[in-house]
Amino acid sequence: MMENFARLYHENCDAVLDELRRTVESIDPAQLERLMEAILGAGQVFFVGVGRVLLSLQAICKRLAHLGIKAHYVGEITEPAIGPADLLIVGSGSGASLFPLGIARKARESVDCTIAHIGSNPDSPMKEVADFMVRIPVRSKLYLDDEIESVQPMTSLFEQALLIVGDILAKMIIEYRHLDMKGLWRCHANLE
């Protein structure tokens, strides 16, 4: 086994947690407030992303469903139609990933729903499609000057921050709607 594993583990824990704290604290609360208002005002909320970003978005989607919000991710087998009263949340650090960008463009052209982009790059092609952006200013594959550096591989910090911000918003929705924490279990899967 590796020498000094415990020390190295704790050093890495400190580094990752410090990055996460700096990241979530760097997000503009006004952007998050606009996203929460859009979620609460939408008939349905749809999520689109790829790779590890999609995994974080799917977890957020599930949590919103636990709160009684009609939430779906693009591509799920039971995905309903999206309409003008709905919200599409696009997760893409670069804002240029082909599939999320293509879906956002189609949503804009075909139903003209509200589109929110959660990403790192404020000057991406998504800027022309989205109604607003929530910027998570972390290291992306673009290496922009104002991005928060990370010791983690590739875009791990973006995906982690995305999930944590989703859970923070869920907690704020619970508080805003005065939901009973115990009562949330009624929306949890019960065939497990």
Image: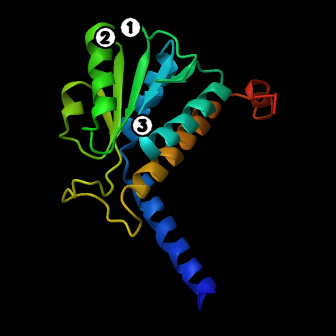
Q: Which residue is mark 1?
A: 84
Dot 1 surroundings within 10 Å: few (below 14), some, or many (20 or more)? Answer: some
Image colouring: rainbow
Q: Is residue 27 left or right of residue 46?
A: left
Residue 32 tag number: 3
Q: Earlier in the sequence, mark 3 or mark 1?
A: 3
Q: Secondary structure at mark 3?
A: helix
Amino acid type of disc 2?
Asp
Is 170 drawn above or below residue 143 in the view shown? above
Is 106 drawn above or below residue 20 in the view shown? above
Q: Secondary structure at mark 2?
A: loop
Tell me if label 1 and label 2 are in contact, CB under 8 Å.
yes
Along the viewing direction, whichever of 168 and 141 lies nearer the viewer: 141
Amino acid type of disc 1?
Pro
Tell me if label 3 and label 1 are in contact, CB under 8 Å.
no
Dot 2 surroundings within 10 Å: few (below 14), some, or many (20 or more)? Answer: some
In the figure, residue 53 lies in which quadrant? top left
Q: Which residue is mark 2?
A: 112
Along the viewing direction, whichever of 59 and 25 lies nearer the viewer: 59
Residue 41 in percent (x, y) is at 48, 16
Calculate the distance from the C-alpha at mark 3 to the C-alpha at mark 1.
Answer: 21 Å
